[in-house]
């Protein structure tokens, strides 16, 4: 269920949403005229490289996609830049500081968590690890692996957006 489908009543005045507008965007309340938008959530992730040209993969410890490979990243907090978010998430997940953070590409993604399917816009960066040997499996990570981009198995990759950005690195 996408977030727009969860709003069966106006969150301000409690008016029931007409059945014929069950997931219309934006939500428009007939009772109090509230207009509410459902925009995608923003996430930021990075392909972090070491001096040998290898990239850092994380093995996800939690659902969704538990056991699959991903790259450091996560949801951008309100008030944060994408650059700040990817540096914070990388610090939390693998303990690394980043240098030369550069935008690579973006992809729409769907993130399934419990009963809700969140539309997400993934912003993907490339970056260099300041001290790659210091990487460790941190928050939500069961293991870390360094691979040359060409050696990453596409069947192991957690999300289509990560796979699409991997193809750019493999060119
Ligand atoms: Zn209302």
Image (cartoon, rainbow, N blue to C red):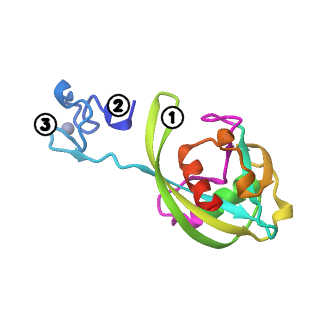
Q: Secondary structure at mark 2?
A: helix
Q: Is mark 3 within 8 Å of ligand 1?
A: yes
Q: Secondary structure at mark 1?
A: strand
Q: Residues within 10 Å of mark 2 (few under 14, many from 20)?
A: few
In primary-sequence order, the first of circles 3 and 1 is 3
Q: Residue furthest bottom?
A: 100
Residue at image mark 1: 112
In the image: residue 110, left or right of residue 130: left
- The quarter holding residue 1 reads top left
Please give the range of residues in magenta. 62-85
Residue at image mark 2: 6
Q: Position of residue 47 (x, y in %)?
A: 66, 60
Camera-near label (1 vs 2) is 1
How many labels, in total?
Answer: 3
Query: In the image shown, does 158 or 97 lie closer to the viewer?
Result: 158
Q: Position of residue 42 (x, y in %)?
A: 47, 54
């Amino acid at each position: 269920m996408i977030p727009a489908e969860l709003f069966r009543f106006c969150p301000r005045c409690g008016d029931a949403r007409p059945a014929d507008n069950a997931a219309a965007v934006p939500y428009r309340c007939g009772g109090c005229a509230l207009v509410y938008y459902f925009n995608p959530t923003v996430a930021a992730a990075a392909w972090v490289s070491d001096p040998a040209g290898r990239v850092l993969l994380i093995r996800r410890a939690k659902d969704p996609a538990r056991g699959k490979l991903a790259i450091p990243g996560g949801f951008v907090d309100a008030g944060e830049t994408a650059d700040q978010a990817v540096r914070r998430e990388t610090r939390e997940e693998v303990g690394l500081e980043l240098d030369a953070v550069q935008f690579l590409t973006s992809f729409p993604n769907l993130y399934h968590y419990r009963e809700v399917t969140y539309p997400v816009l993934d912003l993907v960066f490339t970056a260099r690890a300041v001290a790659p040997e210091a990487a460790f499996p941190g928050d939500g990570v069961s293991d870390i692996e360094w691979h040359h981009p060409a050696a990453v198995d596409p069947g192991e990759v957690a999300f289509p957006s990560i796979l699409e950005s991997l193809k750019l690195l493999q060119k």
